[in-house]
Image: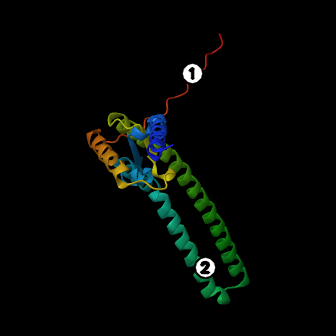
């Protein structure tokens, strides 16, 4: 077999393989940075600000409680040698009780923040996911991947800025944020006749 006929056979085989490649080679693909959307979107910023405002009073109370404990501890260290045995024992008990109360309150505070953050982040993820899907459909994307599962993507594939712009436009068009609706009362149980 001559070299040109071998090349022709190879070219036909290569052409057949290329024709058999899946249609994904012509797909429109985008990459979105979900953590960036959460941090930079107006909706994400509003969630964080609302949580700060909600928990700031408790945080200030905890800070004051901690400062009071430190002051009591310093007073005990400073004046402990001159106190009577009874006074020192009461001051130490007061300090232990205060430290225990503080640790319990701090633990409850952290638990409440965690629960609230999870609740709000779940709601925010749904909103952002809906926006990404809407953007992908309107822009005729076949696939939009999250950066968390992608090792490398050229910047041209990053649709995060466009989605941020859409979120900002949606936020500007939305009416003033209202508090979440109250949970409806459970239906009344039928009374036996």
Residue 126 in view, yes or no:
no
Q: Is residue 14 left or right of residue 41?
A: right
Instruction: Of the two numbered discs 2 and 1 on the same chain, state the one appearing first in sequence.
Output: 2
Q: Quadrant of the C terminus?
A: top right
Secondary structure under the numbered disc 2 in the rendered image: helix
Determine the residue positioned at 34% across, 49% down.
Answer: 42
Q: Quadrant of residue 106?
A: bottom right
Secondary structure under the numbered disc 1 in the rendered image: loop
Residue 31 horizontal/vertical position (percent): 41, 48
Residue 66 in view, yes or no:
yes
Furthest residue to the top? 193
Q: Which residue is mark 1?
A: 188
Q: Which residue is mark 2?
A: 73
Foreground residue among 7 and 166: 7
Q: Quadrant of residue 170?
A: top left
Q: Residues within 10 Å of mark 1 (few under 14, many from 20)?
A: few
């Amino acid at each position: 077999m001559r070299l040109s006929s071998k090349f022709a056979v190879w070219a036909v085989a290569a052409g057949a393989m290329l024709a058999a490649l899946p249609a994904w080679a012509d797909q429109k693909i985008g990459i979105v940075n979900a953590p960036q959307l959460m941090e930079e979107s107006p909706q994400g910023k509003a969630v964080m600000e609302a949580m700060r405002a909600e928990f700031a009073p408790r945080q200030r109370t905890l800070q004051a409680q901690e400062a009071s404990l430190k002051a009591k501890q310093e007073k005990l260290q400073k004046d402990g040698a001159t106190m009577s045995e009874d006074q020192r024992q009461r001051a130490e008990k007061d300090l232990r009780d205060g430290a225990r109360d503080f640790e319990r309150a701090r633990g409850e505070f952290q638990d409440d923040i965690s629960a609230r953050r999870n609740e709000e982040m779940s709601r925010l993820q749904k909103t952002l996911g809906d926006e990404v899907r809407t953007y992908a459909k309107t822009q005729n994307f076949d696939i939009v991947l999250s950066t968390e599962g992608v090792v490398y993507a050229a910047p041209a594939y990053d649709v995060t800025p466009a989605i941020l712009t859409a979120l900002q436009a949606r936020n500007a068009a939305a009416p003033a944020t209202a508090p979440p609706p109250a949970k409806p009362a459970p239906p009344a149980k039928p009374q036996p006749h």
